[in-house]
Amino acid sequence: MLRSPRFVDKSPAQVWATLLDETTYYCSIRSMYRYLAANGKVRERRNQVRHPNYKKPELLAEAPNEVWS
């Protein structure tokens, strides 16, 4: 049911509620998520920010009064 054209853009909770309104019960919402995870169909939908590696600046003074912090 989760792959049917009718429910292709709905979350498992919405599918479960719609089917329950139609007096049809297949499984729990958690079981729907387990099924999707087993088939690789559930993932994080937000864009994940990847921070660049930060290199600590190295201050090197070769004469007096060259480096201030």
Image (tube, rainbow, N blue to C red):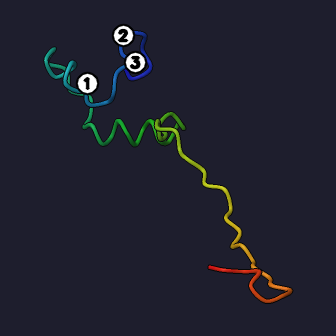
Up the image or down, 1 lies above or below 42; here it is above
Farthest residue toward the right?
62
Q: Nearer the viewer, mark 2 or mark 3?
A: 3
Residue drawn at (77%, 80%) of the image? 66
Q: Quadrant of residue 4?
A: top left
Residue drawn at (16%, 22%) of the image? 20
Q: Give the image location of residue 33, x and y in percent.
A: 37, 39
Q: Could you tell which of marks 3 and 1 lies nearer the N-terminus? A: 3
Up the image or down, 7 lies above or below 41; here it is above
Farthest residue toward the bottom?
64
Q: Give the image location of residue 58, x and y in percent.
A: 75, 77
Name the secondary structure under disc 2: helix
Q: Quadrant of residue 35?
A: top left
Give the camera-side residue of 25 and 45. 45
Q: Is residue 40 left or right of residue 21?
A: right
Q: Is residue 45 left or right of residue 19?
A: right
Amino acid at circle 3: Asp
Q: Is residue 13 left or right of residue 59?
A: left
Give the camera-side residue of 34 and 49. 49
Residue located beneath label 3 in the image: 9
Marks 1/2: CA–CA distance: 11 Å
Residue drawn at (52%, 39%) of the image? 47
Give the camera-side residue of 3 and 11. 11
Q: Is the Cβ of the residue at disc 2 closer than 8 Å to that at disc 3?
A: no
Residue located beneath label 1 in the image: 14
Amino acid at circle 1: Gln
Q: Give the image location of residue 27, x and y in percent.
A: 26, 34
Residue located beneath label 2 in the image: 6
Query: Image quadrant for the N terminus?
Result: top left
Q: Is the Cβ of the residue at disc 1 closer than 8 Å to that at disc 2?
A: no
Name the secondary structure under disc 1: helix
Q: Residues within 10 Å of mark 3 (few under 14, many from 20)?
A: few
